[in-house]
Image (cartoon, helix red, strand yellow):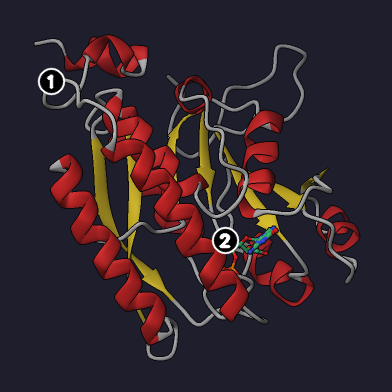
Amino acid sequence: MAGLQSGPVDDDGGPPAALVDVVLPCLNERPALPKVLGALPPGYRAIVVDNGSTDGSGALAASLGAAVVDEPRRGFGAAAHAGLLAATAEFVAFCDCDGSLDPSQLATMLELVCTGRADLVLGARRPARGAWPIHARLANMALSWRLRRLTGVPVTDLGPLRLARRSAILGLDLRDRRSGYPLEMFLKAHRAGWRVVEIPVDYAPRVGKSKVTGTFRGTVTALKDMATQLAAASGRTPQTEGGSSADRPAADAERATP
Ligand SMILES: Nc1nc2c(ncn2[C@@H]2O[C@H](COP(=O)(O)OP(=O)(O)O)[C@@H](O)[C@H]2O)c(=O)[nH]1
Ligand SMILES: [Mg+2]
């Protein structure tokens, strides 16, 4: 296993490969891109998924050195999943492309997964003043309460900053292509027996306009998509508490064996 800050050196002597690919779903986030990309620590490669932006986000991201993936099909999940499919690093993180989150806090998440203490790490947002609209906060509190009851995982936020092993997330076979994607990831990870761990992360006011919780349409779509995921999860017979370790990310399952 390579160190946490720099990836393995390519066989051909080229630049070190990224240890973490950071998927950044991006719909018209031009004003935020310099801050977001400038905040990525060494060893973390930005994959900006341009979700049909009309403000030149994709071209700006490429000029700033990011890998850019085009995903014309609209939807947070469509963008996030296209980024996951384009990723090649051992670990993948997801982060809003709006300047609200601090990618340097991914280092703690990476450490938890690398050392076998977690399979999926979620960032629980600690908002600065004005960062989080009250309706979104209340909806998120209600969702977290429901998730705690449903899964027993002491989750307090279904936050957008998260990290896991790439091959493991691919194995979850995520299907949602809209706002239910982060919830589907959590529910399927739990069902597969993953250790889902939450750590606090800073949450600053975003740069530019919100596409989800800041708009009526975005909020309604998010609620509908979450309800679909919850209904699917509630209707299933739960596995043994914590799920089957056979479904866990392989490397971590090995480490978890006493
Ligand atoms: N809602 C939405 N967001 C998208 C889409 N494609 C990419 N995104 C990005 O997904 C991220 C989350 O959206 P954001 O506006 O930050 O939602 P908020 O955090 O709830 O305010 C941002 O980086 C958006 O640019 C899409 O089709 N719909
Ligand atoms: Mg956001």
- Is the CB of the residue bearing disc 2 within 8 angstroms of ligand 2? yes
Task: Report x, y in % for residue 73.
Answer: 79, 47
User: Which is nearer the N-term, disc 2 or disc 1?
Assistant: 2
Task: Report x, y in % for residue 115.
Answer: 27, 28
Image point (41%, 47%), residue name: 183
Residue 140 visible in the picture: yes
User: What kind of element bears circle 2?
Assistant: loop
Distance from disc 2 to disc 1, alpha carbons, whole Å, reads 34 Å
Image point (91%, 58%), residue name: 59
The residue tagged 2 is: 96
Foreground residue, 129 or 38? 129
Q: Amino acid at mark 2?
A: Asp
**Circle 2 or circle 1, nearest the eye:** 1
Foreground residue, 12 or 193? 193
Image point (78%, 54%), residue name: 51
- Which dot marks residue 240? 1
Task: Assign the C terminus to one quadrant of the image.
Answer: top left
**Can you say whether 103 is above or below 140 in the image?**
above
